[in-house]
Image (cartoon, rainbow, N blue to C red):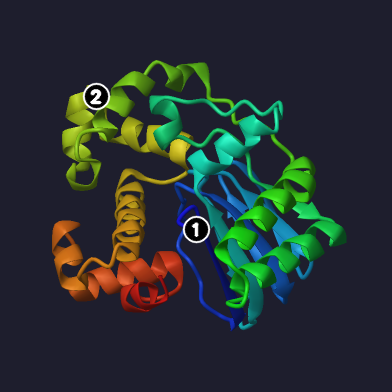
Amino acid sequence: MPYVETRKACQSRICYKSHSHPTFSIGAIDAGQSHFSSSFAQDQLIQAGSVVVIPAHVQHSCNPLPDQAWSYQMMHLDAAWLATLIEELHQDIALENGRQAIHFPQLKPTIVHDVIVYDTFTALNRLLFNEQISVLEKEQYLVKILAEMLIPNFHWEKIHSSHYFQKHLPDLLECLEDNIENLSLQVISEKMNMSRYALIRLFKHYFGLTPHAYQLNYKVNQARQRLREKCDLAQLAYELDFTDQSHFHRVFKQHTGITPKQYYKKS
């Protein structure tokens, strides 16, 4: 089931850098408390029973309170796969296609405080982790639960961009298609004919991340995909232009909570 990735963390104290995923993500808090932060939503304190819904490309961080541990589940769904399912359900959710959808957040993240939604998501995860159940049965259950319980209970609110920044969108999209992970701040500002400060504001407005943070986040998401394809770690660090394997290891763990080697083994 390459369109779904799910994992659990128990009594974790690991903190994450602000990041985003190209996937649609659902998280559930099993124990403890965490601080949820995003440029596209109000900061919130979440706790056991909370379900966090994070649409694709939405910048966020979710970290335990100081000197405390928490347990949680996290599911990542391929955005195109989910969009197709939503279309099949004839849901009135405007997910845009085309170039903008590839890069930009469209929907705000939400927190759901509903014990039935939490229990349903937890039961879904238990089934997906069960090695005694066939892939066909897992797929059917995933579609059924998403269609009947999860999607209808999520709050779909669009992110609206300011008119001031909108005029720069075509140029920014063109730059993002041009080897973004290796472009410097100076190069991008020259390409877009704007100051470096204005460019930083533009990235923060659309992504919630600075250009450098966006580039590192992009590399980590590329690495996740390549590691699922069993790419050699040393080769991957070189191809993604990290200084060395140690640098790759450190950045990857800051964004995902585990090392590239651990991710490779569990994929």
* Residue 223 pos. (x, y %): 30, 60
Give the residue pinned by disc 2: 192
Mark 1 Cα-neighbour bin, 10 Å: few <14, some 14–19, many ≥20: few
Q: Is residue 24 above or below residue 260?
A: above
Residue 160, percent across and down? 58, 26
* Left or right of 247 on screen, residue 28: right
First along the sequence among labels 2 and 1: 1
Residue at which label 1 appears: 1
Figure quadrant of residue 40: top right
Disc ID at residue 144: none
At a point 66% along the width and 54% down the height, the residue shown is 140
The answer to whether the residues at label 2 and label 1 have Cβ atoms under 8 Å apart is no
Mark in the foreground, 2 or 1: 1
The amino acid type found where label 2 is placed reads Met
Amino acid carrying mark 1 in the image: Met
Distance Cα–Cα, label 2 vs label 1: 40 Å
- Report if residue 64 is visible in the image: no
